Amino acid sequence: MKKISAVIISMIICGNLPAQKVANGGYNSYEEYKNNKPTYADSFIVKKRTTGDIKAWGGNDFKVEYLSESVTKKMIKKEIWGISKNDTLYLNAEPLSGLYWYARVEIVGKYCFVRPAFPINGKLQKQYGLNDPQFGYMFGALGGALQAMQTAVKRIPVIYCPETGNKMLLCETNLAKLMENNTGLLAEFNAETDKKNEEVLLKYLKKLNDVDKR
C-alpha cells in the first residue's frame, strides 16, 4: 500500500471527540477522553521504540513511562486507555493487537485510524480476517513461513471506533460497509479506480468522519 500523505495523517478532531484542545495526560477510558478529563497528570514519557527492541520483545511502537511511582508499569500496560501528549493521542494497543505498549492514532474521529502490531493471537487474526486470501498482498503468508522477528515489525491498518470498541482492517469492503447509510459518499467511493490504495481509503475515512461531525 502507498504511504499516507502528510495532510491525511495529520490529526483530525471530529465527531463526538473533544472540540477544544485535548488536555495532556492519561485517560482511563474513552468517556474521560471525550470529556477532556484525564485521570493522570501530564507526567508521561512516550518513547518511540527501536526496530531492534521490537524484534527482540515484540509489541507496539511506543513505550510509555511515568515520572512518579504512583502510576505503575502494570497500570500503563493494562489500565490506561490512552495518553494525550502534545496534540497526539497514543492508544493502548493491547486490545487491538493482544500485545503491549501503545500506537499513535493517525486520524482521530468517530472512526480512528491506527497501526497496531500484527496480532500473534489466532482469535484476533480471525477477527480481523487476516487469514482471508485478499489480504495476502498486504501481509504475506501466515503460519510457519513467518519468522518471529519478521512478524514482530509488521503493522496492520485498523479502523477503530472508540465509542463502541469495534475494530476492523482498513480495506475496501469494510469502509464500504461503514458508508452504507450515506449513499452519496458510497457512490463517490465506488467511482474511484483504485480502492486498494491506502491514500484513497483514508481520504474517504476522513470524509466519513466529517459527515458524522455535522
Image (cartoon, grey):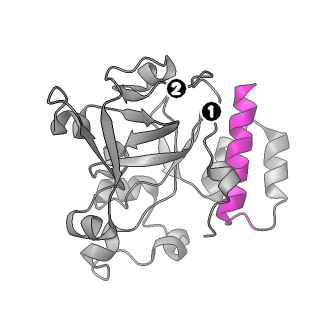
Find residue 92 and report its horizontal and vertical position in percent. Answer: 35, 41
Is 1 left or right of 74, judged from the image as shown? right
Q: Which circle, 1 or 2, is nearer the viewer?
A: 2
Q: Is residue 139 above or below residue 205?
A: below
The answer to the question of whether label 1 and label 2 lie on touching residues, with beta carbons closer than 8 A, is yes
- Judging depth in this view, the residue of 65 and 98 nearest the camera is 65
Name the quadrant containing residue 69. top left
The disc placed on residue 22 is 2
Which three-letter amino acid code belongs to the residue tagged 2?
Val
Residue at position x 31%, y 54% from top?
Answer: 123
Q: Residues within 10 Å of mark 2 (few under 14, many from 20)?
A: many
Residue at position x 33%, y 59% from top?
Answer: 119
Q: Is residue 209 magenta?
A: yes
Q: Earlier in the sequence, mark 1 or mark 2?
A: 1
Which secondary structure is most common in the magenta stretch? helix
Q: Secondary structure at mark 2?
A: loop
Work out which quarter of the rendered image holds the C terminus and state it: top right
Q: Is residue 18 magenta?
A: no
The disc placed on residue 13 is 1
Is 79 left or right of 86, judged from the image as shown? left
Find residue 178 and report its horizontal and vertical position in percent. Answer: 65, 42
